[in-house]
Amino acid sequence: MYGWRAKLAVITPSANVVTEPEFELMAPEGVTCHYGKFHFTGGDVAALKNLEQLVPDAAELISHAQPDAMAMCCTGGSFAGGLGYDKKLIEKMQDRNGHLPTTTTATAMIDAFQALGIKRVSMAVPYLEDVALTERKFIEDHGIRVQNLNWLSIPGAIDNAAISRETLYRQAKAVDDDKTDAVLLSCVAVHTVAIIEELERDLKKPVVSSNQVTMWKLLRLAGVKETFSGFGRLLAEH
């Protein structure tokens, strides 16, 4: 029997081809992931805010699988409206999913920072400028200093998926400095989990990514407390 420990429901943008394979890499024994979609291929903050109208329907549909926990797995879509916007989305999802334990990627990101004791973070992101600056404000409004920020100005999820490991690695190293407690690789549409361990060894500090924090939060919401190596300190220690 699959999913005997937990079934996780994950709703993602329609053009996202990264979350599913990364979640399958991270899922522990006895945990299954079940995926739904909402229409989004990329864009600016205005386009991301439109997702508020689409996510509740997706949440209701995937709830038919009777999952133990659910996530809206889209970083930009869950911080686009600023402080508190992620909590608003969670309420809308729970109104339609039977009040399951529910999170968003932005919510999981802030919770991960708190679990790791991060006070200053540096960000390496693929986003357009307005999305990158909105995320910086969202994080700082939670009392966490953004030390450095670099964005690649890539508008689309499919293009994000094509970013090379070398580009991500060098972008992460470029934003790091001695005052940075951790490096954030934001966006669920970017392949990140395969380089987290290498970056943590080289930078000597935690590295967090969107899919990683969402998996971590979903597991904990579903009552799976297992820690395991291979995907950074967050999943190995918290």
Image (cartoon, grey):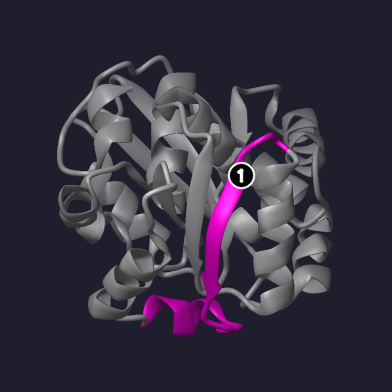
Q: Is residue 133 left or right of residue 183?
A: right
Q: Which residues are magenta?
A: 142-162
- Who's the residue at 71% across and 65% down the image? 133
Q: Where is the N terminus found, in terms of image quarters? A: top left
Place of residue 172 in the rendered image (x, y in percent of width and height, measured from the top left): 36, 65
Give the percent coordinates (x, y) of residue 135. 67, 57
Point 52% across, 42% down: residue? 120
Q: Judging from the image, what secondary structure is the residue with disc 1 in?
A: strand
- Identify the residue at horizontal 75%, vertical 65% (top origin): 48
Looking at the rendered structure, the kind of residue marked 1 is Arg
Q: Is residue 57 above or below residue 157?
A: above
Seen from the viewer's position, the closer of residues 125 and 9 is: 125
Tell me the crowding category of disc 1: few under 14, some 14 to 19, or many 20 or more residues within 10 angstroms, Cα based: some
- Position of residue 16 in the picture relative to residue 94 (left or right): left
| Residue at far front of view | 178
- Count of residue discs: 1
Determine which residue is flagged by label 1.
145
| Along the line of sight, the residue nearer the viewer: 200 or 112 | 200
Quadrant in which residue 229 is drawn: top left
Viewport quadrant of the C terminus: top left
